[in-house]
Each structure stands twice: as C-alpha cells, then as structure tokens.
Amino acid sequence: MDMDQYWKLEQIKESVKGKKLAERNVVFQRLRKDPALAAFLGFAITGAGRIYATGKGWGKLALLWILSLGLWILMLGWIVWIYSAWDGYKAAQEYNEALMEALEI
C-alpha cells in the first residue's frame, strides 16, 4: 500500500469513527472494489485490474508497457506487410524473367 492509499484509508477511518456498524457497512459497500471485476479487467487488459483496484502501482506501468509492446508489434506488422509486398513484387519479376527466358522472348 502506498502513502496515498494509507492516508485515504486513515481519512475514511476518521470519518466513520463512532458511527454504528450499519453506517460503516454502507460506507464499505460504497467504496469496495469487486475482486471478480478486477480479475476480469486484469485478464482483458494487462494492468487494468490493478488500476481499477488501487488507481496506483504497477498497473499503470504494466498498461504502458503493454501499449508500447502493442505499438512495437504493430510497427513490426507494418514492416512484415511492406516486406511481403516487396517480396511479391520481386517474385513476380523473377517469374516473368524466367518465363521470358523459357519462351525465348
């Protein structure tokens, strides 16, 4: 737990001091995070579950990392796409040259 979370919890603790159990339960239900939703978000988007649960920590770094990785893969995809286009062009040229030789044109 980082300091921001610690101070937030301390503020909540102070705000419910002396309140009845039912009132504290209402505050808990309003502020709680659903672990199943956090797990789903973390599965769907790396780091999103941590961001949902805490708003801090490595979740933002993980999300940034996965976005960077996605961008890198996307860039690599463009390189493969461009290479594939060039390779097809060269293959057609070579085929045409071989065909011209075979036909003695």
Image (cartoon, rainbow, N blue to C red):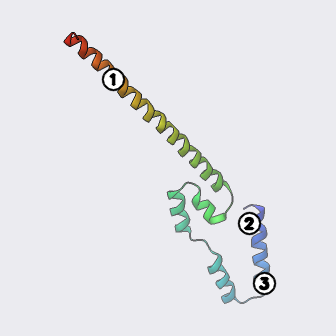
Which residue is tagged 2?
Answer: 5
The quadrant the C terminus occupies is top left
Which residue is tagged 1?
Answer: 91
Give the mark toward the camera: 2 or 3.
2
* Front one among 93 and 56: 93
Circle 2 SS class? helix
Q: Mark 2 or 1 closer to N-term?
A: 2
In the figure, residue 81 lies in which quadrant? top left
Q: Tell me what residue is drawn at x 80 percent, y 79 percent.
A: 14
Q: Mark 2 or 3 closer to N-term?
A: 2
Q: Residues within 10 Å of mark 2 (few under 14, many from 20)?
A: few
Q: Residue furthest left?
A: 103
Q: What's the CA distance linking mark 2 and mark 1?
A: 61 Å
In the figure, residue 15 lies in which quadrant? bottom right
Does the CB distance between marks 2 and 1 fall below 8 Å? no
Q: Amino acid at mark 1?
A: Ala
The image shows residue 40, relative to residue 92, as above or below, that is below
The image shows residue 58, relative to residue 25, as above or below, that is above
Residue 86: percent from the left, percent from the top?
41, 27
Which residue is tagged 3?
Answer: 17
Q: Amino acid at mark 2?
A: Gln
Q: Tell me what residue is drawn at x 62 percent, y 50 percent.
A: 64
The image shows residue 29, relative to residue 84, as above or below, that is below
Q: Amino acid at mark 3?
A: Lys
Q: What's the CA distance linking mark 2 and mark 3?
A: 18 Å
